[in-house]
Amino acid sequence: MADTRESTNDDASAGFSEAEREAMKQRAAELRAQAAGGTGTAKKKKEAKACLDAIAALSGTDKDVAELLHRIVQDEAPHLDPKTWYGFPSYARDGKVIVFYQPASKFDTRYGSVGFNEEALLDDGAMWATGFAVVEVTDEVEATLRDLVRRAAG
């Protein structure tokens, strides 16, 4: 039996929220900038500025957590390069994102999260966590993030 529903332009994007579509646009812009940005030091400086700009645009707990993560990466894993990934402040090794902060404000969620991609060296047996919800900055949160970043970065 034939499908009789009418197709609209909205049908094609119904699977993604406006925030998700915006994140995809940001990622496409990041990829274009990387391709046009050259190589070496100039490229890394541009990417680092984009990361700092992304952090500066945040507010409240999102900003507190992103600033904390940035300080931790500088202290514990200075060999990771700051950049953005889907508009998130992130930190990469050899061009591959290891750790990132997904602000709560990005997708209007209850909490922001610090996430680790598969290149992070966090393997621990048959199962391990790769994402951590953060609702406030405390000494305990800082200590945990320092340990995770140190291990993830290698």
Image (spheres, grey):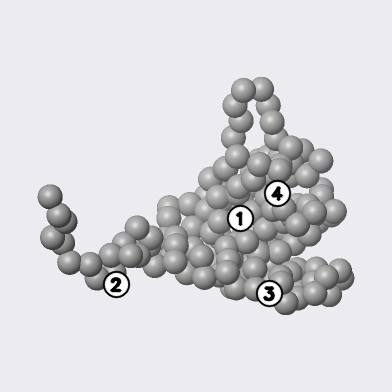
Q: Amino acid at mark 3?
A: Ala
- Classify 25 as above or below 126: below
Task: Identify residue type, mark 2.
Answer: Asn
| Nearer mark to the viewer, of 4 and 1 | 4
Q: Compute the Cα span from label 2 to label 4.
A: 36 Å
Q: Which mark is residue 101?
A: 1
- Kind of residue at disc 4: Ile
Contact, CB < 8 Å: mark 4 with mark 3? no
Q: For the view shown, which residue lies furthest in the top direction?
A: 125
Residue bearing the label numbered 2:
9
Q: Which residue was labeled with disc 4?
A: 98
SS of the residue at dot 2? Answer: helix
Residue 1 is left or right of residue 142, and the answer is left
- N-terminal-most mark, 1 or 2: 2
Q: Which mark is residue 33?
A: 3
Q: Residue at x 74, y 37 (%)?
A: 121
